[in-house]
Image: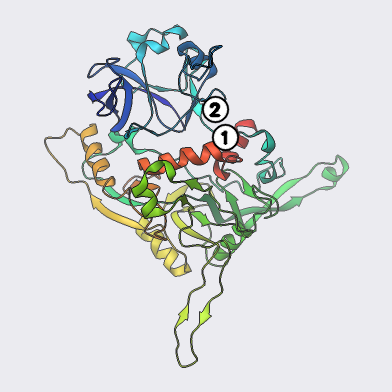
Amino acid sequence: MYQAYITTIKNLRPHPNADRLDLGECFGNTVCVGHGDFVEGDLVVYFPTDGQLSEEFCAQHNLVRRKDDAGNNIGGYLDPAKRNVKAISLRGEKSDGLVMPLKSLEYTGVDIHSLEVGFCFTAVNGKEICCKYIPRRPNCAAAGGANRTRKKKVPTAPLFAEHADTEQLAYNLSAFRPGDEIEITLKMHGTSQRTGYLPVLQGYRRTIWDRLFRREGEPIYDYGYVSGTRRTVLEDFDGGYYGSNEFRETHSKQFEGKLWKGETVYYEVVGFTTSGTPIMGDGSNEKLGKDFVKQYGKTTTFSYGCTPQATPALIKAPEMTQVLPATPQSDCYVYRMTMTNPDGQVVEYTPDFMRYRCEQMGIKTVPVFTHMIIDYAPNIPEGTDKIGEMVKAIAEAYYDGPDPVGKTHVREGVVVRIVNRPKFTAFKHKNFAFKLIEGIVKDTAEAPDMEEAQEEEKENA
């Protein structure tokens, strides 16, 4: 869920290459601000990347580009149609988000002196301020429409739970406590999928009265396999975002005959569809500098070792027993498993047990960077952000660099999971280079990516 935050701006300093700009930090992210606009410790409104500002907010503060009769820009730098906040580089320095003064909210009628650090919002006093940015193109208004399943009066699989949203690490540092067991894994840039062996609708038991009054009758459930995207249940693998969900079916069937009753597995599908289209959009690397292009090439394709056209396994000479593995068009990596009893009570598998089950099934899991217990520190009060800052620093030792799977593109970031929570508790942390590429992809994409198309569906349902 995208939100704006009330926070303080820290570490203010002059921009080394621009006299009219200063650099500061919000939630550890470097931001560019106007020279002299803020002083150290000011309360500010911070808009993270990947958000969209409301038309009214932008109009109140002249934030979008507009020109006078002579063609000179007399507005801000935001695109008038998109109004999106994205990671940018200004004169060689990172700017990760947008900072506005607290008084920018005065027009809503709110008493700005009542706003405190930690307040997060999308609207103030009933006035929309921001929302998640989802590209919407005129030629694909129904981009996610084919993914919709036929609505029923009763659910197809009532115990088939959606995966919990993974919030940003930087805004949840107070969630960590001394003694917490944490695991840091690779965050993979693909599309979410889930498969369960759960009670599934088999049909209806109809009495003579049901037939007489044309009622569906009592639903009949029995254990069966059910698959879905992050937000939808797939009754079949026709249609979908790219016209076919065939690539999803391949991975769904891997679990058939292997899951225990009540198990649900959550996984990321990466690479390409069966038609060779990248699951996630390509992005240009040109704006990230010569060194980045030298390391990763001119274009980022989130392939994770997959290829647009799958290659079959090759057997070497008859006297040799080694078999070269096939290169898949897409691959899947499990990051979560649960057990749900008939009453709907969910038990989280620990990461170790999840990997044990996946090893039994011959399924890959997301790469692990580190696993540790946060040592108790008597000088750090429990529940303070200082512990979270330590966790964030550990995460940032792993969140940047080449993807460890395919090694051809930059990694998206990491996920930090608190293992010792009864419910799934994890936070994502993306690196700046990925955020730049993500912003470029969204600016040039023909449509929202699969995940965001489904989010749009849910909003409009």
The residue beneath circle 2 is 82
Asked if residue 218 is positioned above or below residue 40 in the image, the reply reads below
Q: Which residue is drawn at 84% across and 43% down?
A: 209
Q: Of label 1 and label 2, which has the lower sequence position?
A: 2
Which part of the image, by quadrant, shows the C terminus? top right
Horizontally, residue 453 falls left or right of residue 148, namely left
Q: In the rendering, which numbered label is found on residue 27? A: none
Circle 1: residue type: Pro
Q: In which quarter of the image is residue 92?
A: top left
> Which residue, as the protein is rendered here, is positioned at the far left?
379
Asked if residue 352 is positioned above or below residue 164 in the image, the reply reads below
Q: How crowded is mark 1: few (under 14 residues within 10 Å), some or many (20 or more)?
A: many
Q: Where is residue 68 in the image (x, y as percent from the top left)?
A: 53, 12
Q: Give the CA separation, mark 1 to mark 2.
A: 8 Å
Q: Residues within 10 Å of mark 2 (few under 14, many from 20)?
A: some
The one of 273 and 165 positioned closer to us in this rendering: 273
Q: Position of residue 9 (x, y in %)?
A: 27, 22
Name the element at disc 2. loop
Q: Residue at x 43, y 64 (%)?
A: 357
Q: Where is residue 399 in the image (x, y as percent from the top left)?
A: 32, 48
Q: In the rendering, which numbered label is found on residue 135? A: 1
Colour scheme of the rendered structure: rainbow
> Which residue, as the protein is rendered here, is positioned at the far bottom?
319
Circles 1 and 2: CB distance less than 8 Å? yes
The one of 301 and 340 positioned closer to us in this rendering: 301
Q: Where is residue 111 in the image (x, y as percent from the top left)?
A: 38, 7
Q: Can residue 362 be seen in this view?
A: yes
Q: Quadrant of residue 140?
A: top right
